[in-house]
């Protein structure tokens, strides 16, 4: 897999349905241990909640897990997981915390409430696309800095470090299939004066 979607950061959101409070928590995770740790963290934070439902999807071994945590079977964990899958995200864990408000929602009401909890959690975490990226370095004179900054922006590069010394050394990530085009463009606009040095590959956010 050279590209996948996940959430950018841990986040949460909530809503109230017939006096029941639903809180959706989300976090990017890469392993089952990270997912379980996050679930336990939320359970400890909301030890007094009526339910702490969860679901997570990992690229590792194509893992999918969920729990209704005491809600009627199929009305909680499955809807949370279903929203994750339909959103196309992976390496993500969602915990849906419920404080019962005294009014039964019924099976259909629970499915809708937990689906919405998962949806708002994912939205709060900001869904992004991760892709296989080249880690690239280049060094230019100060007089060329504005031009290369614009060039990198045009190609959607993520600048990770800029070192202002005798010249300007820039480290950035760029979707791997764009590297050759960027290298050619840089040689063209600099008259062959500047080149790129690919030092590695990672998965990184792409624009």
Image (cartoon, rainbow, N blue to C red):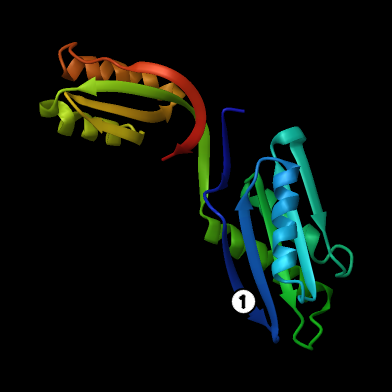
Q: Residue at x 40, y 17 (%)?
A: 198
Q: Is residue 194 left or right of residue 155?
A: left
What number of labels is visible? Answer: 1
- Quadrant assignment, res 17: bottom right
- Quadrant assignment, res 180: top left
Q: Is residue 200 left or right of residue 64?
A: left
Q: Position of residue 120 (x, y in %)?
A: 59, 65
Q: Residue at x 21, y 29 (%)?
A: 148
Please determine whether, in this image, residue 94 is positioned above or below residue 187.
below
The quadrant of the image that shows the C terminus is top left
Q: Residue at x 17, y 19 (%)?
A: 189
Please determine whether, in this image, residue 203 is positioned above or below residue 74.
above
In the image, farthest residue toward the top = 192
The quadrant of the image that shows the N terminus is top right
Secondary-structure class at tag 1: strand
Q: Is residue 89 left or right of residue 133?
A: right
Q: Position of residue 168 (x, y in %)?
A: 21, 27
Q: Residue at x 19, y 22 (%)?
A: 140
Q: Position of residue 177 (x, y in %)?
A: 44, 22
Disc 1 marks which residue?
A: 15
Q: Residues within 10 Å of mark 1 (few under 14, many from 20)?
A: some
Q: Position of residue 114 (x, y in %)?
A: 72, 67
Q: Is residue 53 left or right of residue 74?
A: left
Q: Is residue 156 visible?
A: no
């Amino acid at each position: 897999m050279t590209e996948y979607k996940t959430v950018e950061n841990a986040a949460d959101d909530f809503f109230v349905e017939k006096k029941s409070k639903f809180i959706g928590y989300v976090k990017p995770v890469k392993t089952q241990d990270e997912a379980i740790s996050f679930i336990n963290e939320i359970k400890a934070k909301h030890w007094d909640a009526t339910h702490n439902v969860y679901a997570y999807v990992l690229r590792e071994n194509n893992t999918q897990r969920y729990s209704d945590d005491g809600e009627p079977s199929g009305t909680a964990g499955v809807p949370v997981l279903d929203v994750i899958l339909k959103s196309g995200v992976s390496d993500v864990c969602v915990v849906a915390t419920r404080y019962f408000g005294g009014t039964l929602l019924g099976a259909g009401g629970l499915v809708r409430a937990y689906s919405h909890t998962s949806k708002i959690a994912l939205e709060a975490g900001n869904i992004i696309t991760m892709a296989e990226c080249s880690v690239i370095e280049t060094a230019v004179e100060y007089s060329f800095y504005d031009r290369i900054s614009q060039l990198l922006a045009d190609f959607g590069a993520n600048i990770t470090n800029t070192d202002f010394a005798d010249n300007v050394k820039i480290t950035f990530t760029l979707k791997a299939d764009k590297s050759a085009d960027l290298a050619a463009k840089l040689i063209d606009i600099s008259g062959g004066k500047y080149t790129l040095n690919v030092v590695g590959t990672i998965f990184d956010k792409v624009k």
